[in-house]
Image: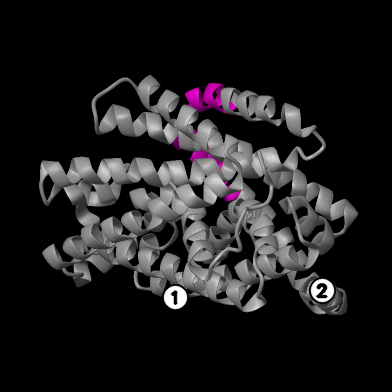
Amino acid sequence: MSEKTGENLSSFKIAATYIGTIVGAGFASGQEVLQFFSAFGLNGILGISLSTLLFFVFGYMILRIGYALQASAYVEVVRFSNGKVIGTIIDLIITIFLFGALAAMIAGAGAIFDEQFHLSPWWGTTLMAVITLITVIRGIDGVINAISIVVPVLLIAVLFIAIYGFYRSPITAEDIQITHSLVGAAPNWVVAALNYASFNLVIAVAILAPMGANVEKTKTLFWGSLMGALGLGIGVVAIYFSILSNITEVGAVEVPMIYIASLLSPFIQLLFAVVLFAAVFSTAVSNLYGFVSRMHFVADQHQIWVIIGTTAAAFLVSQVGFSTLVKYLYPAVGYGGFLFFAGLLYAWFTKKDQLQNKTEANKG
């Protein structure tokens, strides 16, 4: 598994990879948006705005620090930002979460095959494990290229389904009232927005950090993080409105966006299930790549066995079930990620001279 790309990345590829790293089963299914934003009614818009800003600011920080350090793995950025002791704790949190999230994505693929294709979940989990393994063996080039292809199709599909859902049933005062009875993923919209950005950035750092080392100009990082954050924000807004406008029907279902897709036609429902599978794949490859890149102490000739072993272990853990993994894993990691946020801010303002010197050295 190569740790550097064979090309200088464009802003588009950075943005697409950033989006693809985050838009896994929870995002594209609508379940994350329901729990973190729609459940708070109109305040959800404020939460989306805050999360989008955080995605841009902290995504850019990670990319820039990765560029300055010429990082080959996220651990270098974490240790630089948070120091040896706290950095080690955050490194452990991220490493465990990458593995757990990989297992959750594999389990999510099984759930799609079971609920949408009416096939044994085993087929979905096996297929996801195999194609994820093959993609990561090709290295970061394979990861970035695969995600860059998936993301445009995914966003178009999500926007199409979301706009139809909103068009079919505009938001009413009754819809807003119903949200008052829903239990969100956090006590209020501010905490929900912070937590949502936090656990997603904990996933994203694994791929953003090494990407920062593969550009010629730092402005590429700025535009890549900005476009990535805006793409995520637009996608979340579209899903938010479609869920809120159909809250009576989707408030208690597992996959809100598939339900809304079913309102168009059975064919569109099936098509979106395929798109959702692709979204799960894009996050799964990011998680596996990030986890394996952390094992940098393993000799290159043995890394393929680390990839195979990690995938096999995640496949076994995935048998616990998608909803169980997400319910307990994601929020806990989100709160732990606040430490990482604090470390990034500390490093950005107190170590700026070091970053500038390293950046100038890279340019030279």
The residue type indicated by label 1 comes to: Leu
Left or right of residue 110, residue 301 in this image: right
Mark 2 = which residue?
Answer: 355
Quarter location, residue 344 = bottom right
The crowd level at tag 2 (other Cα within 10 Å; few <14, some 14-19, many 20+) is: many
Q: Quadrant of the N terminus?
A: top right
Residue name at image x 50 percent, y 35 percent: 132
Q: Is the residue marked by circle 1 packed among few (<14), some (14-19), or many (20+) residues within 10 Å?
A: some
Q: Secondary structure at mark 2?
A: helix
The boundaries of the magenta stretch are 314-332
Residue 330 in magenta stretch: yes
Q: Position of residue 122 (x, y in %)?
A: 39, 20
**Foreground: 224 or 24?**
224
Would you name the residue on which mark 1 appears?
46
Q: CA distance from mark 2 to mark 1?
A: 33 Å
Q: What is the count of numbered marks?
A: 2
